[in-house]
Amino acid sequence: MRIGLLGCGTVGQAVVRMLSEGGATITRASGHRLELGPVLVRDASRPRPGVDPALITTDPARVLEDPEVSIVVEVMGGLDPALGYLRTALARGASVVTANKQLLARHGPELLTAARDAGAELRFEASACAAIPVIKVLRESLLAAEITAVTGIVNGTTNFILTEMGRGGLSYEEALARAHELGYAEADPTEDVGGADAAAKLAILSSIAFHSRVLIDDVPFEGIDRLEAEDMEHAASLGFVIKLLGVARLIGGAVSARVYPALVPRGHRLAAIGGPDNAVLLESRATREIMLVGPGAGGAETASAVIADILSILGTHQGSFLHNALADAGRPMAPPGGVVSSFYLRMSVADRPGVLARIASVFGDEELSIRTVVQSGAGDEARLVLIIHSGPEDRMERALERVRSLGDVRGEPVMIRVLGSGEGGDRR
């Protein structure tokens, strides 16, 4: 079985190394001998350890049109030209393994259809949570379990930053700088800290879990770049930690999928996941809760998922399991305004009589009640932290809009959802 490789950076080189070092084991287990075929790179002058220079090429046709290449592995990233390359590979019947989360989150249904029509396989375990086999578990082990919710820490960069802010007392800027130093953050971390990376992964996981077609544009997302050290301190004093979560669930038969920072109760399983690790909590009526934990990024970790997908293709007859497991159940996307949650709210206000009463009146008008109030003052300004009892998000948004317009409120309030405090699940 000849493997064509699109891209040979950190992940690609790790794939080459694993194919070489694990070749004998793969042959014994699968009955197939995997052979590295042509390797597409941008710069052919750079050495690639372990790769025969004769296999290196800058011509994509050598990979995509080689009739002996039966599996094309894409680890180059980006949407263009990767999308066109995968279309070409699938059209001629080659199976595809990709680690490209943005590509799958935007064009997954199209590529799955192309694979089905060609009788080929499309595998993408490495596109979400790297070495954690969450897609395989959803697609195979829990296929009949009827998943009702997927809640995950699916971005290691933000989890590291929030861990450093919470445990080490660092500011957001200091924690981000530390993530850069240790290699946990990209040179441009915008997709990570802004929530787009997690949204792409959640779109993929939601599609598998709920047998739906969820794209990244269906997943509203928020990041962590507005959080401050005092939010971590307030959360800790109230018995919480803050995590950036991807949360997908069925609500009235529709799919709700969103990414946002949330207060997580200190005793919750996800609260203990620190550093750059990822974790995904799967809920169903049949199995209750199953949590998968591990490294969600890294060259070797991602490569291990790529190799696992290759082995899955070797053990799957054409056009079978993957496509049926991803059959579209026709579920719509749930409007986010109807999702029920509890909320943390931090704001600066004028330190004078009647301010809290006016703010409380706004929430009362929207039928939202205040559970906890923490107030501290300095000069003519006070810092107000509220925990709001659970209610629909559209009511919270209306209340926030009115609070912003109050003359007593200074600056932009910070709102964070609270995990497990009234979040609505499937109420069919």
Image (cartoon, rainbow, N blue to C red):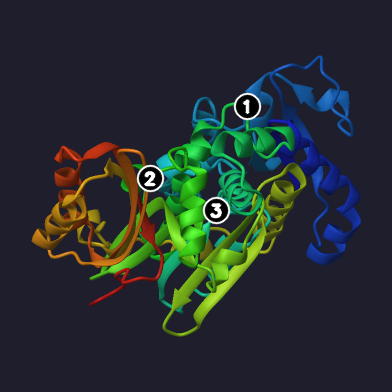
Task: Tell me the CA gap for discs 2 and 1.
Answer: 21 Å
How far across and down, in percent of the image, does residue 214 sit?
Answer: 36, 52
Residue drawn at (46%, 45%) of the image: 200
Question: Could you say which disc has been placed on residue 187 in the image?
Answer: 1
> Do callouts 3 and 1 mark residues in contact (Cβ within 8 Å)?
no
Sequence-first tag of 2 and 1:
1
| Residue 221: assigned label | 2
Residue 244 in view here = no
Q: Secondary structure at mark 3?
A: loop
The image quarter containing residue 177 is top right
- Point out which mark residue 53 bears: none
- State whether residue 375 is above or below residue 41: below
Image-quadrant location for residue 412: top left
- Seen in the picture, residue 320 relative to 214 is either above or below; the reply is below
Q: State the residue in front, 119 or 321.
A: 321
Q: Residue furthest left?
A: 365
Query: Whole-Å distance between the Cαs marked 3 and 1?
Result: 19 Å
Q: Is residue 407 left or right of residue 195?
A: left
- For the point 17% across and 58% down, which residue is it? 360
Sort mark 2 into few (<14), some (14-19) or many (20+) by Cα contacts within 10 Å: many
Q: Residue at x 85, y 43 (%)?
A: 17
Q: Earlier in the sequence, mark 3 or mark 2?
A: 3
User: Circle 3 sits on which residue?
Assistant: 154
Could you say which is closer to the camera, residue 190 or residue 399?
Answer: 399
SS for tag 1?
A: loop
Question: Which quarter of the figure is the C terminus placed in?
Answer: bottom left
Task: Please state if 11 lies on the left or on the right of 328 as rendered.
Answer: right
The percent position of residue 13, horizontal first and vertical second, equals 79, 36
- Amino acid at the residue labelled 3: Val
Residue 160, position as x, y percentages in the image = 63, 48
